[in-house]
Amino acid sequence: MRDRMNVYFPPELLKQISDLADRQKLSRSAIVEAAVASFLSPDGSDRREAAFTRRLDRLSRQLQRLERDVGLTAETLALFVRFWLTVTPPLPNDAQAAAQAKGRERFEGFVEALGRRLQKGQSFLREIPEDIVRQEPAGGPD
């Protein structure tokens, strides 16, 4: 069942509708119905805008995670350096060569362990729950 609706068009628009209906061998009502349906349905630009919005939302979430990870990395490094400088006494000159050799050995072990973790897809930053990061006081950890 169809409901009737009376509309008024400017003469030049009505002529275009009539010409198109003649060319397409359709009724003027069918042409107007198709035009109104097209107007009311989401068009290509609306779909593109929705796709861009979804992509921007995804990029925003990725950027937030990146910002979180960089902040955690900087805080972790700063905390480690402060701790290391606080608890590591200076070495006498005659012990520095042995300490440097031991440091190189430990660093090589660290790089190997890091490589193994990365190959397995493990990440220290992913082990830190989001809620812990959000609860951090404004001044940061001490």
Image (cartoon, rainbow, N blue to C red):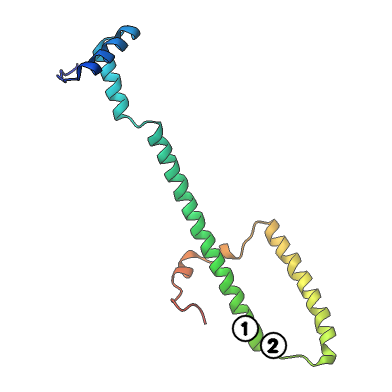
Q: Residues within 10 Å of mark 2 (few under 14, many from 20)?
A: few
Q: CA distance from mark 1 to mark 2?
A: 8 Å
Disc 2 marks a residue whose amino acid type is Thr
The residue beneath circle 2 is 88
Amino acid type shown at disc 1: Phe
Looking at the image, which residue is at 83% across and 89% down? 95
Percent from the top left, x then y, of residue 41? 32, 29
Quadrant in which the N terminus appears: top left
- The image shows residue 4, relative to residue 100, as above or below, that is above
Which element carries disc 1, helix, strand or loop? helix
* Residue shown at 81% from the left, 87% from the top: 96
- Residue at image location 51% in from the left, 79% down from the top: 141
Q: Is residue 33 found left or right of 105 in the rendered image?
A: left
Quarter of the figure with residue 33: top left
Residue 34: x and y in percent read: 30, 19
Left or right: where 91 falls relative to 53: right
The residue wearing badge 1 is: 83
